[in-house]
Image (cartoon, grey):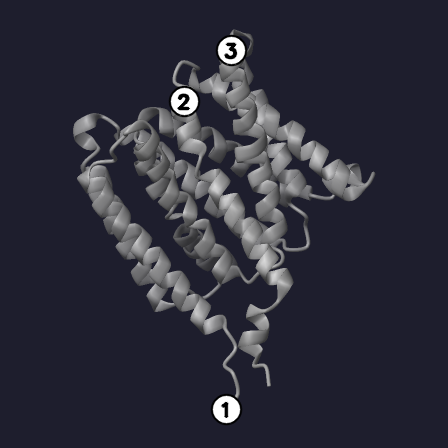
Amino acid sequence: MTTPALALDADPARQRGLLLVALAALLWSLGGLLVRFLGDVDVWTVVFWRSTFAVLFLAGFLAWRDRGRALQVFLAIGWPGLLVAVCFAAASTAFVVAVSLTTVANVLIVLATAPLMAAGLARLVLKEPVRRATWLAMLAALAGVALMVSGSAAHGSLVGDAIAFVTAFCFALAAVTIRRHRAVRMTPAVGLGAAIAALATLPFAAPLAVAGADFGLLAVFGTVQYGLGLALFATGARLAPAAPVAMLTMLEPILGPLWVWLVLAEHPGAMALLGGTVVLTALVANTAADWRRARPVPPAA
């Protein structure tokens, strides 16, 4: 007889969902590398074109998926969707700015604390209980980030680390808002957030000064890395349990610094590696514990 646990593992929809989430995390992990390749383009122009291409992609995605109902879906997001849009606009802008000021490893390590920030916000805002193991993981992650930024002080990149925290907090706040308003479809809110980021950075950008090769990279950055990544995640996360989804999104902070190290030889530094190891260990241990608690216990034979 097939046990419930084995049945869960054999669920093709679940497997497809996890594959989509893994692909999304893989695409997101390329963000730091793309920013480094765009070194001659100012940060505001990068944010403008990345956001603009993401808007175009997500608008096409919604039009295809909702078959003429995209406008109704967009209007239904209400104030929760507006809050999520502002969060994504701030997070995406802060990410590009942070990567321009500090190492990719530092930015992605700080972003890895977003799930733990979300747990704390959920406790304060939604009154959801937080397990003791989660609080311990938060403390361990904070200790890891402290180790990481201790190595940044000498290189003048503390401002970049601080801006990375803005990205992590905005993602956490968006996650709590989405959880509080589960009935609201938030894909239009993500597109609106990209539009807000594009409009907010346009006065400071020089969109017509971008050369052909850089324009192609910006198209990939906005359409594939950002827009397609969000579409894959939004689709896959609905098909799989939350715990394994959270574990797969950790591929971004793990792979991101690796791509930059391998391709551009940007070594993150010993303290960043040590702090990152502490942060990721805390996250993986906490998420694995949640996964074990969520899995059904098979009946005795």
> What type is the residue that disc 1 sits on?
Ala
- Most distant residue in the right direction: 68
Q: Residue at x 65, y 42 (%)?
A: 187
Q: Is residue 13 left or right of residue 274?
A: right
Q: Say which element carries label 2.
A: helix
Which is nearer the eye, 84 or 109? Answer: 109
Type of the residue with mark 2: Phe
Side of 61 relative to 137 (left or right): right
Q: Quadrant of residue 230?
A: top right
- Say which amino acid is labelled 3: Val
Q: Label 3, on which residue?
A: 210
Q: Which residue is mark 2?
A: 37
Circle 2 or circle 3, nearest the eye: 2
Element type where label 1 sits in the image? loop
Mark 2 crowd level (few <14, some 14–19, many ≥20, 10 Å Cα): some
Q: Is residue 213 visible?
A: yes
**On the rendered structure, is 280 left or right of 123?**
left
Q: Residue at x 25, y 49 (%)?
A: 144
Q: Which percent across, then down, holds residue 34?
A: 44, 27
Label 2, label 1: how far apart the Cα atoms are: 56 Å
Q: Please name the residue that numbered disc 1 is placed on.
A: 300
Give the residue at the far left of this rendering. 154
